Image: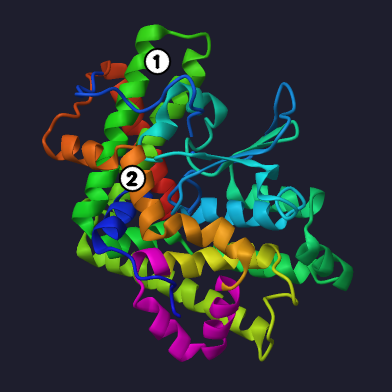
């Protein structure tokens, strides 16, 4: 089977609209966060489009690791797979908690911005006395502190440096450009439009309430808004067809390199990338194949025709309970439909299309800061 069970096109289109990997907002219902929910996190991507996170020490350790994610997020998938394979997840699936979040809305609340001011994205991991807001830092932390059986095998074989070289190569591919490039400008503009409205709503709330950390939050919101504006300029309706195609061609070349490297590592092996057991390299590579499953299933035949051993690898991966638990069950039709309805995604999209979501007016000074930040971000992205 190429991609598991066939999935409903409407559900897939909703997932694409909110995944790739945004006042007054006038709503017939409030933004969907309650006191019982912990709000939630996108991740990195040429200087990559999305903001880069990091790692910091928290005031106190958490009793159980908490990983904030969106079910179809590429970078959250890497973190979830790495957690599943680590000592924290390999023994029992309840060794860590997952905080599911609609990342074009829920991750922009003040509470989440305080947890992850770096990116306001997924994944974010609270573990020990650390808060880690970058998927690559998450997988490195788990590899060095809580290696599972596959990672211990890599360490014992002396192949850790080779493994990290492959992981770095896989990081060169920008999933955001791939996914949004295949979505089309209309869907991309809608998702980013919703993001920008909620970001401006919570920025306006910060300015009204003036909390002690107001300046930190304002800077975080300004930078995030500028980042979303830059994303849209590169991949959405703000991009010229020529610029968008050039960006996608460059990214396709990176993807070809990653797939060829994975194929070479596998050779004629009947195992995984670095041995008989799944390891961090697989945790960083398998979400690429899941992206095909969610966004462009036709890619499988193209890739497998060129790299036949990747077909067998994907089939072995799908037979793994760890892969099912971390990556695949959450993107099945029923699971995605339940998530979308629980998070009121159709209502949010309908309200946006009907013009019921309205950004508040912001002070001229703040608007100028946003414009200046967007110029800086564009210069960073274009080099």
- Residue 22 visible in the shown view: no
Q: Is residue 108 above or below residue 162?
A: above
Q: From the top left corner, tell me how far across and down residue 280 is, in percent.
A: 69, 62
- Residue to which mark 2 is pinned: 340
Q: Nearer the viewer, residue 277 or 196?
A: 277
Is residue 268 placed above or below 179 in the rendered structure? below
Q: Which of 261 and 339 is in front in this view?
A: 339
In front of the other: 247 or 110 = 110
Total label count? 2
Residue in view at x 47 percent, y 19 percent: 35
Q: Residue at x 40, y 33 (%)?
A: 106
Label 1 vs label 2: CA separation?
28 Å
Residue 124, placed above or below residue 165: above
Q: Quadrant of residue 377?
A: top left
Q: Are marks 1 and 2 in contact (CB under 8 Å)?
A: no
Counting from the top left corner in percent of width and height, residue 29 is at: 24, 24
Residue 253 versus residue 47 in the image, above or below: below
Q: Is residue 360 magenta?
A: no
What range is drawn magenta here? 293-318
Secondary element at image label 1: helix
The residue under the point 24% across, 58% down is 10
Mark 2 element type: helix
Q: Which of marks 1 and 2 is in front?
A: 2
Looking at the rendered structure, which numbered label has been put on residue 206? 1
Q: Position of residue 138 (x, y in %)?
A: 66, 48
Question: In the picture, which quadrant includes the C terminus?
Answer: bottom left
Which residue is at 66% across, 54% downward? 84
Q: What percent of the width, then of the height, locates residue 322? A: 63, 62
Q: Tell me which label, 1 or 2, sits earlier in the chain.
A: 1
Chief SS of the magenta region: helix
Mark 2 surroundings: few (<14), some (14-19) or many (≥20) residues within 10 A? some
If the image is split into quadrants, where does the N terminus sit?
bottom left
């Amino acid at each position: 089977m190429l991609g598991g069970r066939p999935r409903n096109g409407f559900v897939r289109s909703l997932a694409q609209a909110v995944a790739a990997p945004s006042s007054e907002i006038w709503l017939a219902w409030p933004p969907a966060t309650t006191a019982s929910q912990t709000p939630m996190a996108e991740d990195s991507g040429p200087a990559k489009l999305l903001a880069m996170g990091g790692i910091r020490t928290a005031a106190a350790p958490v009793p159980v690791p908490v990983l904030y994610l969106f079910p179809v997020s590429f970078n959250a998938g890497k973190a979830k797979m790495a957690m599943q394979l680590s000592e924290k997840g390999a023994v029992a699936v309840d060794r860590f908690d997952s905080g599911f979040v609609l990342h074009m809305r829920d991750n922009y609340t003040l509470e989440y911005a305080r947890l992850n001011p770096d990116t306001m994205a997924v994944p974010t991991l609270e573990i020990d006395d650390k808060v880690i807001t970058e998927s690559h830092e998450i997988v490195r932390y788990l590899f060095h502190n809580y290696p599972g059986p596959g990672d211990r095998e890599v360490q014992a074989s002396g192949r850790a440096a080779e493994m990290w070289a492959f992981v770095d190569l896989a990081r060169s591919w920008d999933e955001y450009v791939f996914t949004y490039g295949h979505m089309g400008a209309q869907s991309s503009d809608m998702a980013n439009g919703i993001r920008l409205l909620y970001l401006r709503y919570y920025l306006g709330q910060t300015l009204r309430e003036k909390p002690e950390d107001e300046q930190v939050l304002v800077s975080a919101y300004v930078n995030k808004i500028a980042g979303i504006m830059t994303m849209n300029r590169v991949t959405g309706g703000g991009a010229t067809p020529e610029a968008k195609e050039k960006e996608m061609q460059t990214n396709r070349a990176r993807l070809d390199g990653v797939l060829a490297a994975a194929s070479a590592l596998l050779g004629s092996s009947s195992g995984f990338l670095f041995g008989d057991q799944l390891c961090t390299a697989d945790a960083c590579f398998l979400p690429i194949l899941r992206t095909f499953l969610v966004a462009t299933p036709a890619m499988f035949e193209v890739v497998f025709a060129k790299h036949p051993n990747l077909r067998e690898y994907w089939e072995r991966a799908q037979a793994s309970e760890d892969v099912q638990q971390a990556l695949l069950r959450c993107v099945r039709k029923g699971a995605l439909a339940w998530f979308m309805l629980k998070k009121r995604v159709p209502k949010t999209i309908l309200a946006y299309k009907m013009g019921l979501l309205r950004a508040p007016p912001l002070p001229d000074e703040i608007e100028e800061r946003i414009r200046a930040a967007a110029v800086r971000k564009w210069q960073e992205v274009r080099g």
